[in-house]
Amino acid sequence: MRQLGILAMAVLLTAATDLDAPMQSVDGPRAAVDQLFLGMHMGSESIVREVLAPDVRFAVLSDEGAIQAQSLDGWVRAVGASQGAWDEQIYDVDVRVDGTVASVWAPYTFYLAGRLSHCGVNSIELLRGADGWKITQVSDSRRSEGCPDPLARP
C-alpha cells in the first residue's frame, strides 16, 4: 500500500512538471532593467539606449487621465539632459519570463537632484532577440503623496 502511495505521488509530480520546458531565468530581463535605471541615474544616453528596442514606447497617464507616449529619442535626450539628477529606486521587483518574453513589475520612488519627487509602479515589457533582452514598453503610474523613501536612513 505504501509503495502505491509513493508511485501515485511520483506520477502526480511528473504530470505537474514539464520536463521539456527551458529554464526561465529572470537574470537577463532584470539586468536590462537595472541597466536602464543605472543609465538614467548617470545621465548616460548610451547606457540606456543599449537596452532599448528601436521602437520602444514610453507611456504615462497625464494629470487629466489621458495616455501620453514619449518617443525614444525624446526620452533618451531627456535622460542625457538630466545630467545625472534622476535617481529612480525600484524595489519589490517581480520578473516573469516565458521563453523570449518577459514582464517586470517594479514599484519605484523617483528622486530629482537628491529630493524625493514622486513614486508609482513601472510595468516594463521585454523581448529577447538575437542581441539579447530589449525593453519594448515602459508604462508607469505617478503620484506625489504617500511615497515610500527607500533611501531614508533610520
Image: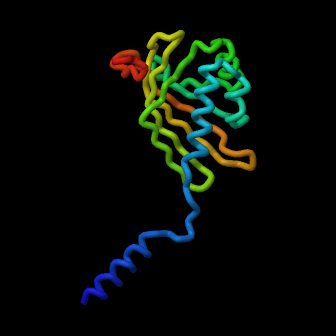
The vertical placement of 75 against 117, above or below, is below
Q: Residue at x 39, y 20 (%)?
A: 149
In the drawing, does residue 111 fall left or right of residue 154?
A: right
The vertical placement of 31 against 15, above or below, is above
The vertical placement of 76 against 7, above or below, is above
Q: From the viewer's side, name the closer residue of 93 and 143.
A: 93
The vertical placement of 100 against 105, above or below, is below
Q: From the viewer's side, name the closer residue of 142 and 35.
A: 35
Quadrant where the image shows the C terminus: top left
Q: Residue at x 58, y 12 (%)?
A: 85
Q: From the viewer's side, name the closer residue of 26 and 58.
A: 26
Q: Position of residue 133 (x, y in %)?
A: 66, 44
- The color scheme shown is rainbow
In the drawing, does residue 91 fall left or right of residue 125?
A: left
Q: Residue furthest bottom?
A: 1
Q: Position of residue 104 (x, y in %)?
A: 51, 40
Q: Residue furthest front?
A: 154
In the drawing, does residue 111 fall left or right of residue 150?
A: right
Q: How many marks?
A: 0
Quadrant where the image shows the N terminus: bottom left
Q: Residue at x 50, y 48 (%)?
A: 96
In the drawing, does residue 75 fall left or right of residue 2?
A: right
Q: Position of residue 6 (x, y in %)?
A: 32, 82
Kindly indicate the quadrant of the structure image that contains residue 59: top right
Q: Position of residue 67 (x, y in %)?
A: 52, 26
Q: Residue furthest left?
A: 1
Q: From the viewer's side, name the closer residue of 39 and 2.
A: 2
